[in-house]
Amino acid sequence: MVLTSHAELQDTDDKTGLWIGEFTDPYYEFIDKEYKVTLASPKGGKPPIDPMSALTENITSSNRRFQEDQLAKKALENTHKLDEISASDYDAVFYPGGHGPIFDLATNDLSGQLILDFLKSGKPVAAVCHGPAALIKAAELDPSLLKGKRVTGFSNMEEKLAMRAKKIPYQLEDRLKELGADYHNALLPFASHVERDGLLITGQNPLSAGPTAEALIELLG
């Protein structure tokens, strides 16, 4: 799992980072199926957590489980640096969201190449919410990557409803379309929605995090 290291929204004092439920929901999907999970981020160490994701209304059962899981908490506090990670050592890669990825993972060469290495090796790549922003750098390295591919990610409408559209450099839906992706979303904002196109699996929003992981597990099976 590749997590963001970015904590700042633009033109504001508001903080962002990893949306904690988009990490914990997939993490326990993988752990409960007996997968070994390695955590990485551009800077290594503990990633910033979006404070909004820790509010009571955004807490999931997996968040509560995580609070009692010392092994998982230690892993999150000590993520590997991306330059220590090779696609050859893993079966798949998963990118959780939070607004952080649209700043750092979207521009990170190591992350972009990692995605291409997984796909070229016939290994799946999954991302949820703003996690698909990592595909932007991969598509810049290989412009054919997203051409005509069915994908989803946090929608323009959801960005508007979340009231952060003016605090980010671009909207993910627009950028994915500009790169040639065949973007789809749920009829209702914040409803769970997952797209799979070959080895690429994307989820739309926080509620899609677990189902995106389930789709990845099914593909690995």
Image: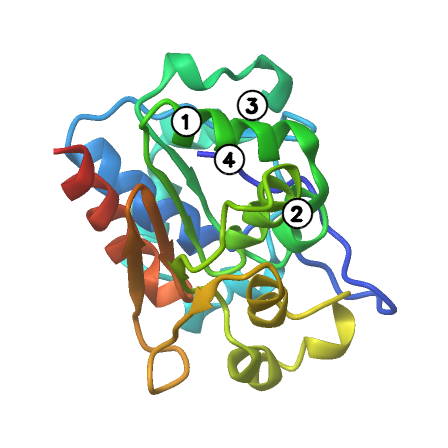
Judged from the image, the secondary structure of the residue bearing numbered disc 2 is helix
Q: Which residue is mark 2?
A: 106
| Badge 1 or badge 3: first in the primary sequence | 3
Q: CA distance from mark 4 to mark 2?
A: 12 Å
Left or right for 76, reference 118: right
Left or right for 116, reference 89: right
Frontmost of labels 4 and 1 is: 1
User: Do the residues under discs 4 and 2 have CB atoms within 8 angstroms?
Assistant: no
Asked if residue 153 is positioned above or below residue 200 in the image, the reply reads: below
- At which x and y percent is residue 79? 55, 25
Type of amino acid under label 1? Lys
| Badge 3 or badge 4: first in the primary sequence | 4
Q: Which residue is mark 4?
A: 2
Q: CA distance from mark 2 to mark 3?
A: 22 Å
Q: Quadrant of residue 174?
A: bottom right
Type of amino acid under label 3? Asn
Q: CA distance from mark 1 to mark 3?
A: 29 Å
Frontmost of labels 3 and 4 is: 4
**Residue beneath the point at 32% across and 77% down:** 191
Judged from the image, the secondary structure of the residue bearing numbered disc 1 is helix
- Between residue 71 and residue 156, name the one nearer to us: 156
Q: CA distance from mark 1 to mark 2?
A: 19 Å
Chosen colour scheme: rainbow
Q: Which residue is mark 1?
A: 120
- Res 46 visible: no
